[in-house]
Image (cartoon, grey):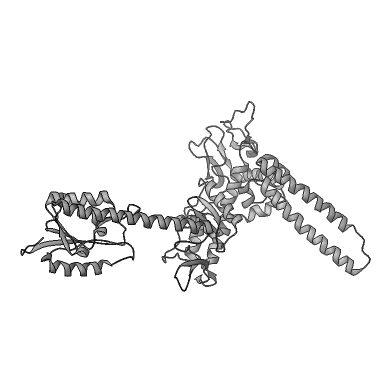
Amino acid sequence: MTTTQQITGREYLRVSKKKGQSCDEQHADNIRSAETHRIMISAAPYIDDGISASKYSRKQRGDFARLVKDLTSGAFTDDVLIIWESSRGSRKVSEWAYLIELCEEQGKLIHVTSHGRTYDPRNGRDVRSLQEDAVDSQYESYKVHTRTARNAASNAADGRPTGRAPYGYVPVHDTRTGKLTDWIADDTEAVPGLSKADMVRELFRRIKAGHSMGAIARDFAERGIRNGSGRPFVPQHLRSMAVKCAYAGIRSHHGMERPGTWKGLVSEADYRAVVRMLTTRTQSQKRRPDGRAQYELTRIIRCGKCGGPTRAVQVKGVPSYACRDHGCVQVPQARIDELLIGTEESPGEILSFLGDESRVYAAFTAAPEDEARAEEIRTERERLEGERREAEGTKTATVGEALAMGRLVDSLTEDIERLRAEEQKLRAPAQLADMITPGKDVARRWAAAPVAARRAVARMVLAPSVLGEVRIMPVGPGRRVDPADRAHLHKTACNGCTAA
């Protein structure tokens, strides 16, 4: 195009991440080219900085959409659209073709600085040149995407880390190439005396112990622990961290998992246990105004008349359970807790059940493959127990023999306990075993567990298929009945049961 008349133009500037010419550099080149071609830049440019124009990009180009809207509505009043190169406009043939058609309809020219030329969309040869550039740009985008996807798949297959290091890790780069080679534990302090890596380990440890996300987030905030952005952790962020397999040293790619090349901050067993707990945890629990769980059995105990849940109330100053929805029944809390939970000296239904491993195993049937493995472990455990009894009964002639026999007994005891725990994991429900291990001294473990963990276990145990769903039966006016006698354990096969 040759003319002595000065015309006006407006720029569209775009750069993908940190690649290529920056928007400022493009603008400087555009000014020089516009002056050469007698184009006066008359308005602020449209700018999409750090956004790809590839069809594989997930980000929306806000100013490109505004440019299209302005061309469509007539708000683009300049004579020329100025771009640094064709690919700055778009790397999608269809999108680029639409932009050219809009410019043709509105009588706008397109100046490409890198070409040193102004194109007229009403000229067929000019359109062909612009479209050829679009085809080349889209093909180049395809090659980059394919290469990136192939590299990502290769890195995943090898278990190498990729992307931004999760909180608690710091990245390690090759000093020569600058490529990411590893993630290592971040030993910088989250707060005095606690590193960021240890904070992640504490998170997993507390979730496994049954602490709620809200309680952990509040505690972290009170201690001054902040996330990577310098703000307090919120429960949702902590949960997203807890289900991130990278913390167990596992590489995930398109749903496929394989061992990573970096060292996990937690064991895979602990990671799996936490994920299992988070995907099954119930949120229905009686809470204080500050959000903390308060009672083990509210909402788990049901009304025997309407079948609705119960809530904790005060009846003439006495803590009680009452029908939440209709007020059908109410019963003193202490007597029901004594019946269902009890104490170490006088265990109730739940603690008695959890204290008897054989009842727990019988109630929660393992999967066939787990049961077969559990039987193998039991056989091996019983063999070692026989060896231990034999060793304990062996008479020794010297001090050296006695010490050696003592070490053998200790070693056998350690192996037996390890096998017992493994057998228990296979036969007891995983979530129950993760929070409160059944067996001897369970009352102490129950008392030490947080309320959220006790609630989760109570919900599993007080089920119709296990001990039975607790239903508080109503009584007639004036009748005096022991509150414990009003608690009916409703089971799946209750014959003639009148409970709701």
Spot occupied by residue 125 in the image (x, y as percentages of width and height) = 16, 53
Give the total number of marks visible in the rendering. Answer: 0
Spot occupied by residue 474 in the image (x, y as percentages of width and height) = 57, 33
**Seen in the image, is 461 located left or right of residue 185?**
right
**Seen in the image, is 185 located left or right of residue 57?**
right
Q: Height in image: 472 above or below 384?
A: above
Q: Height in image: 22 above or below 131?
A: below
**Residue shown at 47%/53% (left/top)?**
289
Q: Is residue 365 visible?
A: no
Quadrant holding the N terminus:
bottom left
Q: Check the image and name the residue furthest to the front.
A: 125
**Seen in the image, is 198 located left or right of residue 413?**
left
**Seen in the image, is 328 located left or right of residue 492?**
left
Image quadrant where residue 12 sits: bottom left
Q: Check the image and name the residue furthest to the top.
A: 496
Q: Is residue 260 visible?
A: yes
Q: Check the image and name the residue furthest to the right.
A: 397
Q: Nearer the viewer, residue 468 or 28?
A: 28
Image quadrant where residue 461 sits: top right
Image quadrant where residue 391 sits: bottom right
Spot occupied by residue 485 in the image (x, y as percentages of width and height) = 65, 36
Spot occupied by residue 162 in the image (x, y as percentages of width and height) = 47, 61
**Residue shown at 20%/64% (left/top)?**
113
Quadrant holding the C terminus:
top right
Q: Height in image: 356 above or below 246?
A: above
Q: Nearer the viewer, residue 486 or 206?
A: 206
